[in-house]
Amino acid sequence: MSRKYFSRPIVLLQSSNMASSMGNGIVMVTIPWLVLSNTGLASAAGIVAALSALPALIVTPLVGYAVDRFGRRLVSIIADLASAVSVVAFPILAFFTELSFALILALAVLGAAIDPAGYTARKSIIPDAATASGVDRDTLNGIHEGLFALGWTIGPLVGALSIAAFGPINSFWIPGVLLIFAAVCILALRVGDAGQDARAGNSETQESFWREATQGFAALWRDPYLRTITIAMIFLAGVYLPTESLVLPFYFEATENALGLGIVISAMAAGGVFGAFSFGFLAKRLSYKAIARFVLIGTIVALIPMSLLPPLPVIAGFGFLLGLAWGPMQPLINSLVQTRVQPDVQGRVFSVQLSLFYAFPPIAMLITGFAIDGAGVEIVYPILAGLVTMGSILTLSTRAMRTLDQA
């Protein structure tokens, strides 16, 4: 890899990216574990997951507007500092009072409302860092999403180990420190802002707040390729995410095997690391359509046997393959947005995608939680795998996916 990929702008951006994702990976394990240990109910964890996502439906579109209106770096810094406060609130409040289910829910809602801002802002900085460093944007997209996945690889494992060593409450100090570090890295980052530059040269920047805030959705909906791949990602992620947030935590918590949970989720994320890193290599040799086919077919092949809950090493192995197959999807979406959407609207498009991502999965999580309580993991998990299979096949059959590289 060229030395340009180790330039100051890329190192700072990716250090922030990885620290933030690692911190959120820890929180992803600790909150469900805390809820399950307090209540013993998967439905309770499902309620937390569902309700904590509701504020994001309102906040996330505003985040995209803020990124395009006030600048990518500023929003990223403020978001990471606010997220750090929401995380360390768990152990601080636990020192003074008992963390009831209602209080855990409130803190989870607060954190979930803040998190999308930093994620969206950092994603929007990728083209600026690529320009400042003179590197290929597709390759940097793969590196960015690969390191994000690496953070999720390390995060759950660290979270599981810290739960075993210090308990779930004290585990929240670690992501708090990581999020502060993420903010400091962006504070030290010095790159241009293509969105602000395009906005300064756009004669239509004096439009109403409502029109500006909704431009992201309009741009996304007008483009059939972005629209199709976004809908597919929302559905597939919505059906799949209960695996990480409910199915696997409930399965391993029932056997008091926190380390097993960390190993499996980390294996999935590790596969995602390699898959995302491979995007730059694949994009130089394959069409976007071929990459999308690889993602969807590979997801089916890996998820079906994994849903049968074989022994731990086998689950972890298929989990790695699942992450490997899905890994190139997010860099692909990044490249499509950066190629097909003007710079001063990209933040809003990314935020609309993230907002839609928050809309469907919580409903699936809530339903999955009650289904697990009623029917058990052994029945619910194969059903989820079947839904993912159906969604992938339908996506591959759409005209937009068949003609993706002809646009």
Image (spheres, rainbow, N blue to C red):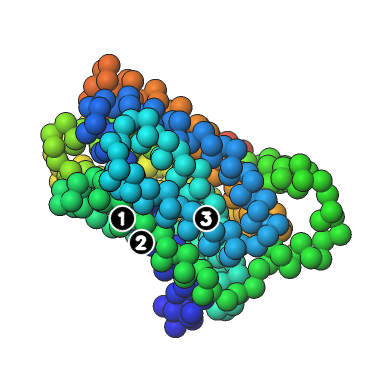
* Residue 220 lies in quadrant: top right
Gap between marks 2 and 1 measured at Cα: 6 Å
The vertical placement of 51 against 260, above or below, is above
Residue tagged 3 = 79
- Asked whether disc 2 touches disc 1, contact meaning CB atoms under 8 Å apart, the reply is yes
Which secondary structure, mark 2? helix
Label 2 is placed on what type of residue? Answer: Val
Task: Give left or right: position of 73 versus 82.
Answer: right
The vertical placement of 369 against 300, above or below, is above
Seen at 42% across and 55% down, the residue is 84
Most extreme residue toward the top is 374
Viewport quadrant of the N terminus = bottom left
Please state the horizontal and vertical placement of residue 329, each as a whole percent of the image: 47, 50
Label 1 is placed on what type of residue? Answer: Trp
Label 3 is placed on what type of residue? Answer: Ala
Seen at 54% across and 59% down, the residue is 78
Which secondary structure, mark 3? helix
- Residue 70 visible in the picture: yes
